[in-house]
Image (cartoon, rainbow, N blue to C red):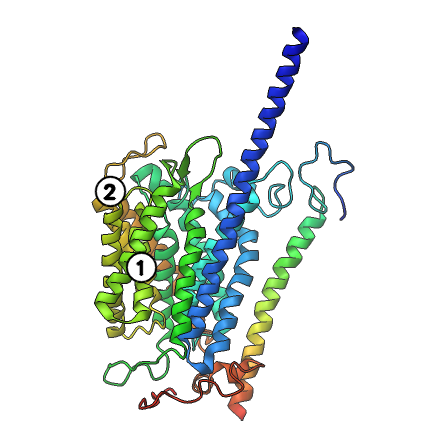
């Protein structure tokens, strides 16, 4: 987490946590969010269509 | 004297460094604006798709289209770029070549020593989203949103980019082994997306009311044709970003195509405009319908896309006319087989792309390729490439949608389809003041309305 550099001279990869483990955690979390969004969307659709079937 | 030489040497070194940075930044800026222009493709698809929907489904169609972008971009980061870099040899990955595309690689984020990866990744992510938008229009008004998202990810972040690795890569096997050439991605973008959509449509089935029991088709008219036609024109604006992204800016010499042969933006300007014009004319001659005229413009571009860097402009024009005239006939043929493609995506992208890829083999054989040992451009290479692109689109499209169909997860319930998807699941109304509520004078409602 945070800055991977202490000076700009010679810096290359400057994204937060570069070279550490936190980018992996954020990557994993992003994948989970995408999968959860699809699941959430599918549930919302199913509920919407079931509700309309009852009306 | 020695001091003067030292000063001059230092000045030359400073100038060289400055020129090097100018080249690097120019390259970065060039692709940055290609990405921005490609968003016009998506604005166009959004307008096109919402306009082509009936008013009861307009917002649901828009939501689907917007979500295609939202899911393609992260998934293309997770694995799409890696697929592109790792699979130029076929189905067996080259892990070393793909290493720079792993989402945890140092190149896959802000990096002061790498000005290229982000803008190239961005441009390719937008190409990926284009394929998903092509699918999106064809399946409107009856596909489940969640099913569409999964299919869009399979198409945009797996199938097309695998095709791009084979057919739009300086080391792709179709180029190095068969002499394939496809400057404007008629194969890996348009054919793959069109044939993927065909596979999905076969499992999805037509919209309720599209076909009568005797097989004749009803016209499920777009609720806002002017909006759809405007969207198609906006797509053309975006194509200049798309085609700009098809050329490599090295900054230290002539432009080169993605296949490594030298070319110019002027060549692409000549031919893109000529085939665009021809496509409109072909669509007009064949149908007199503005929807098909603008779809013809797209098909005209795809018909010449493989050779936009090489064709004589009047040849590009004639290919455009042919492409624009052929695609409405392909769509009619699909209707005979009870394939309900709401926006003609299979015909325009799949058919137009196929025509373009094969036409290149007929009209532009014999150009030398630059990779060592690669054959010259030839018809057989185009034919093998076309078959590969068609299968790479159709097989996953049909297979994944078939699995979803058997799980009951592909299509919305009949009642929701009749009611309209907006009313069934969208929390806001598209036209709350009653715009578009009345049918035009003299036109009766179709069975589905």
B85 relative to B209 in the view: left or right: right
* Label 2 to label 1: alpha-carbon separation: 19 Å
Where residue B379 appears, as percent x and y from the top left, is 23, 44
Q: Earlier in the sequence, mark 2 or mark 1?
A: 1
In the rendered structure, the residue with mark 2 lies on which chain? Answer: B
Where residue A48 appears, as percent x and y from the top left, is 55, 83
Residue B257: which quarter of the image? top left
Near mark 1 (Cα within 10 A), the count class, few <14, some 14-19 or many ≥20, is many
**Which residue is located at x 72 percent, y 46 percent?**
A17
Label 1: which secondary element:
helix
Where residue A8 appears, as percent x and y from the top left, is 74, 36
> Could you say which is closer to the camera, residue B272 or residue B158?
B272
Determine whether B64 is above or below B56 in the image.
above
In the rendered structure, the residue with mark 1 lies on which chain? Answer: B
Residue beneath disc 2: B364
Q: Is residue B402 visible?
A: no
Residue sitting farthest toward the top: B1
Residue sitting farthest toward the right: A6
Determine whether B138 is above or below B432 in the image.
above
Label 2: which secondary element:
loop
Give the position of the C terminus of chain A as an image quadrant: bottom right
Q: Are marks 2 and 1 in contact (CB under 8 Å)?
A: no
A47 relative to A12 in the view: left or right: left
Residue beneath disc 1: B299
Q: Kindly identify which numbered label has been placed on residue B66.
A: none
Where residue B214 appears, as percent x and y from the top left, is 23, 84
């Amino acid at each position: 987490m945070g800055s991977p550099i202490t000076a700009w001279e010679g810096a290359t990869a400057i994204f937060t946590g570069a070279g550490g483990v936190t980018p992996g955690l954020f990557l994993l979390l992003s994948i989970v969010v995408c999968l959860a969004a699809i699941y959430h969307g599918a549930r919302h659709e199913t509920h919407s269509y079931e509700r309309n079937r009852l009306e | 004297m020695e001091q003067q030489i030292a000063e001059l040497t230092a000045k030359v070194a400073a100038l060289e460094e400055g020129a090097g940075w100018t080249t690097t930044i120019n390259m970065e800026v060039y692709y940055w604006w290609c990405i921005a222009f490609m968003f016009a493709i998506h604005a166009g698809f959004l307008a096109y798709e919402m306009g082509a929907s009936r008013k009861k489904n307009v917002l649901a169609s828009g939501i689907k289209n917007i979500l295609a972008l939202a899911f393609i971009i992260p998934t293309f980061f997770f694995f799409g770029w890696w697929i592109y870099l790792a699979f130029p040899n076929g189905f067996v990955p080259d892990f070393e070549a793909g290493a720079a595309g792993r989402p945890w690689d140092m190149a896959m984020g802000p990096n002061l020593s790498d000005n290229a990866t982000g803008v190239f990744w961005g441009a390719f992510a937008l190409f990926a989203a284009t394929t998903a938008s092509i699918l999106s229009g064809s399946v409107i008004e009856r596909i489940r949103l969640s099913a569409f998202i999964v299919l869009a990810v399979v198409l945009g972040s797996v199938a097309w980019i695998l095709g791009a690795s084979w057919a739009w890569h300086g080391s792709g096997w179709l180029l190095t082994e068969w002499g394939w050439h496809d400057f404007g991605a008629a194969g890996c973008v348009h054919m793959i997306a069109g044939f993927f959509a065909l596979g999905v449509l076969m499992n999805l089935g037509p919209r309720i009311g599209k076909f009568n029991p005797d097989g004749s088709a009803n016209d499920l008219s777009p609720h806002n044709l002017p909006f759809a036609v405007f969207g198609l024109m906006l797509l053309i604006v975006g194509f200049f970003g798309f085609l700009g992204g098809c050329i490599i800016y090295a900054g230290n010499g002539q432009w080169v195509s993605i296949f490594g042969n030298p070319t110019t933006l002027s060549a692409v300007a000549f031919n893109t405009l000529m085939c665009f014009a021809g496509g409109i004319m072909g669509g007009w001659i064949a149908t007199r319908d503005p929807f098909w005229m603008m779809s013809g413009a797209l098909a005209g571009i795809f018909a010449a896309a493989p050779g936009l860097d090489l064709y004589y402009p009047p040849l590009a024009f004639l290919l455009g006319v042919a492409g624009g005239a052929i695609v409405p006939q392909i769509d009619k043929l699909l209707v005979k087989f009870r394939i309900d493609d709401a926006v003609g995506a299979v015909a325009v992208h799949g058919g137009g792309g196929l025509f373009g890829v094969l036409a290149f083999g007929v009209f532009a054989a014999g150009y030398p390729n630059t990779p060592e040992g690669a054959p010259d451009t030839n018809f057989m290479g185009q034919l093998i490439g076309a078959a590969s692109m068609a299968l790479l689109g159709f097989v996953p499209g049909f297979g994944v949608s078939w699995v979803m169909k058997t799980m009951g997860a592909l299509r919305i319930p009949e009642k929701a389809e009749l009611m309209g998807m907006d009313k069934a699941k969208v929390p806001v109304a598209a036209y709350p003041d009653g715009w578009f509520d009345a049918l035009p004078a003299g036109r009766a409602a179709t069975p589905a309305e």
